[in-house]
């Protein structure tokens, strides 16, 4: 059997490029949130940072990714319900290529969305003193986070009974940054909320990227962030594989 991941990836990316509003739509909510918090609430929020958009951006990027992976579920669901998935798995190609094409499409499309959000942030005053290695490290963390959520998205994409069910799982992920260090320091939160905020994946990932982009020095948060991303990805990959095997019958 041949590995046709590249061909299937090209098919999916061609569909996205024919309808670039997908990327813009995914970016709209995070951008609107960034505009709202910077220009409406920013003056009343004390984070200790001179530029609130600098403080805010790492969390906004995670929101954009969480919003974008919902389209992976939708694309998979559409392929399954249209019968296209059944046709692919009867062809002389590696069956894993079908899933990996969707995963890599998510990685590329979310990277484009992240670039759009960063460009808007630059217009709003975002500035960073990070060197190329810091930027690569931050991109690596975002890439791992995207892969983790994408494999998570594969599960409802293969098992959902309706389009709404395929995408609904992403809503809690989009709002998870609100209960983290993304918008305000966790020290300002009530004890119970703070305990949750400091022990969920978004906070460690946000803190790591914030340190890479602005402080230039990271602490143990980077290892916690990596552990969360890799842990979620491995578990999601396992259950996605089981769901795919059931789909194969």
Image (cartoon, rainbow, N blue to C red):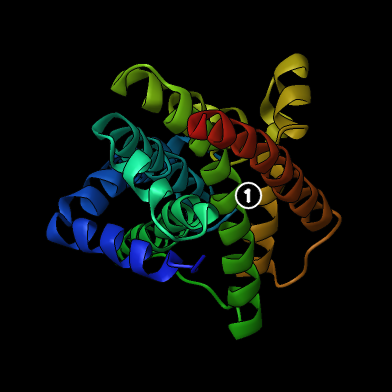
The residue sitting at 30% across, 45% down in the picture is: 26
Q: Specify whether residue 40 is in view.
A: no
The residue sitting at 43% across, 43% down in the picture is: 69
Q: Is residue 187 above or below residue 105?
A: above
Please name the residue that numbered disc 1 is placed on: 206
**Crowd band around label 1 with a 10 angstrom C-alpha radius: few (<14), some (14–19), many (20+):** many
The residue sitting at 67% across, 45% down in the picture is: 233
Q: Specify whether residue 207 is in view.
A: yes
The residue sitting at 70% across, 29% down in the picture is: 197
Residue occupying the far right of the picture: 220
Looking at the rendered structure, the secondary structure element under dot 1 is helix
Residue 119 shown left or right of residue 181 in the figure: left
Residue 198 quadrant: top right
Residue 205 shown left or right of residue 158 in the figure: right
Residue 85 shown left or right of residue 183 in the figure: left
Residue 47 quadrant: top right
Q: Position of residue 75 (x, y in %)?
A: 32, 41
Question: In front here: 106 or 239?
Answer: 239
Q: Is residue 201 above or below residue 168?
A: below
Q: Is residue 75 above or below residue 135?
A: above
Q: Position of residue 76 (x, y in %)?
A: 37, 39
Question: In front here: 248 or 159?
Answer: 248
Question: In front here: 219 or 104?
Answer: 104
Q: Position of residue 239 (x, y in %)?
A: 65, 33
Residue 121 quadrant: bottom left
């Amino acid at each position: 059997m041949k590995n046709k991941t590249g061909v299937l990836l090209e098919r999916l990316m061609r569909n996205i490029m024919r309808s670039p509003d997908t990327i813009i739509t995914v970016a709209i909510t995070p951008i609107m949130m960034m505009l709202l918090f910077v220009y409406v609430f920013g003056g009343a929020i004390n984070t200790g940072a001179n530029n609130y958009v600098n403080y805010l951006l790492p969390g906004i990027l995670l929101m954009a990714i969480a919003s974008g992976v919902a389209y992976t579920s939708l694309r998979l669901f559409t392929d399954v319900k249209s019968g296209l998935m059944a046709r692919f798995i009867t062809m002389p190609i590696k069956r894993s290529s079908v899933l990996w094409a969707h995963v890599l499409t998510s990685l590329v499309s979310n990277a484009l969305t992240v670039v759009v959000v960063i460009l808007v942030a630059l217009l709003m005053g975002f500035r960073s003193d990070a060197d190329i290695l810091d930027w690569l490290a931050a991109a690596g963390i975002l890439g791992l986070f995207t892969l983790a959520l994408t494999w998570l998205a594969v599960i409802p994409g293969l098992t959902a009974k309706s389009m709404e069910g395929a995408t609904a799982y992403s809503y809690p992920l989009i709002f998870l940054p609100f209960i983290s260090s993304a918008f305000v320091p966790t020290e300002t939160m009530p004890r119970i909320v703070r305990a949750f905020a400091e022990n969920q994946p978004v906070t460690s990932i946000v803190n790591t990227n914030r340190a890479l982009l602005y402080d230039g020095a990271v602490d143990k948060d980077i290892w916690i962030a990596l552990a969360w991303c890799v842990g979620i990805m491995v578990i999601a990959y396992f259950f996605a594989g089981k769901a795919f095997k059931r789909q194969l019958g």
